[in-house]
Amino acid sequence: MKKTHIAMINIPAYGHINPTLAVVAELVKRGYKVTYPATENFIPVVKETEVSVLPYHSDSMDLFEQLNHVKQISEAISTHSENLPMRFLEEAISTYYQLEQMYADDLPDLILFDFMALAGKLFAAKHGIDAVRLYSSYANNEHISLLPDVTDEVKNELASKLKAFSEKEGIQGVSFMELFTPEKLNIAFMPRAFQLKGDLFDEHFLFVGPSIGKRSYDESLPIEENNDRPVMLISLGTIFNPWPEFYKMCIEAFRDSGWQVVMSTGSKISPESLGDIPDNFIVRQQIPQLEILPHARLFITHGGMNSTMEALSYGVPLVVIPQMFEQEVTARRVTELGLGQHFLPDEVTVEILQKSVQEVSEDKQLKQHVYDMQKNIQEAGGAKKAAEAIEKFLNESTRHNIHVAH
């Protein structure tokens, strides 16, 4: 009997791909055929889930790869902010044409797509395939939207480009606004308690909390449990991390402290370039975050949604230094919910780092809030709950389609 075929459509960014990996692995385990288009640098991580990987090409991430300092990245984003929505639409259209070729002889029965991977939505609409929208960040509905504000002029340009494309391809019912409207099933990788205005989302939204799978790292860092020093993790994620001044401030702030510091600098900055590394520091370009978090007492982070959720799932309080708009939203949310403190990049000094780390690590009430959120995360169900919901949705839509056919 032919296996039910599920396609997972995403954009090439760790923050969007990582939360889906445990879900697709779970679906494979349940006997589904899962295909996952991936760009060259993500093929190895996606392959580990035992899905069938389909290589494709993307232009969208090339922009950040060439930049070597946080300031350059922020400037590139603000310079291109007017053009970003158009770039995303062009990316979606270019990916759509590749999906048409990939799936020409084997159409999926269901499409899962990241909320930013609009090619998935367009492809599903073209072929009348049911789709499930996955939110690797905050879910959106009529009450809350984190989509960038664009001028009417840009909106009209986007709408007319989409209209011309849809007419050419014979795609019905996907106007510009419909690209962003929720599906019959929408899954968000955070607990409802963390979602902005979480109580205003109906039964079409499922908040499963972080979906954390196995992750392989080039290097293991065994953190000694019996080390007398509490462990502090410092990382600015995978894109917005080339900020040498920040790493030097961290070294100065915690050089002679009681902390065992594990710090990641990202691929653009070599640890050697930071000068003298103190004995209580382990500095690497990449660190096995999921190995270290269970031992950590505190995490200085950029506030990417994956890192935030992973830390909270291990009960680790946060000091957040956001590098872009969405991370600022999360940074404020962390402070608001009493899970840590946050500072904007230009507020950060050696003294601020020392003071906030001391306050956050010693605040008993804050620790309690973190444990409460950890409990919310444990109860939300993660990848298994997501896979169950997808399976149920598939069974219901199959039944409905059979009924309609009769």
Image: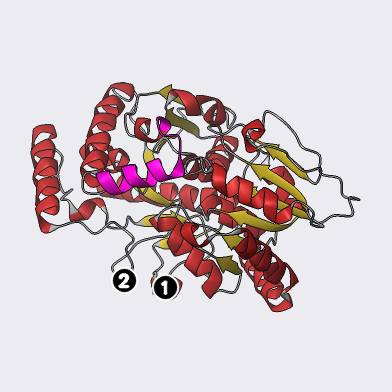
Prevalent SS, magenta region: helix
Number of other residues with Cα within 10 Å of mark 2, as a class: few under 14, some 14 to 19, many 20 or more: few
* Residue closest to the eye, 290 or 264: 264
SS class, disc 1? loop
**Residue segment shown in magenta:** 65-80
In the image, taking residue 169 as reference, residue 203 lies left or right, namely right
Number of other residues with Cα within 10 Å of mark 1, as a class: few under 14, some 14 to 19, many 20 or more: few
The residue drawn where x is 45% and y is 71% is: 198
Residue named by callout 1: 197
* Residue closest to the eye, 264 or 22: 264
Residue named by callout 2: 143
- Residue 152's image quarter? bottom left
Three-letter residue code for mark 1: Lys
Q: Is residue 128 visible?
A: no
Give percent across and percent down for residue 397: 36, 49
**Do residues under tags 1 and 2 come within 8 Å of each other at their CB atoms?**
yes
In the image, which disc is placed on residue 355?
none
The residue drawn where x is 37% and y is 37% is: 109
Q: CA distance from mark 1 to mark 2?
A: 8 Å
Q: From what the image shows, is residue 206 above or below residue 20? A: below
Give percent across and percent down for residue 166: 13, 39
The residue drawn where x is 26% and y is 45% is: 79
- Residue 216's image quarter? top right
Three-letter residue code for mark 2: His
Give percent across and percent down for residue 64: 39, 35
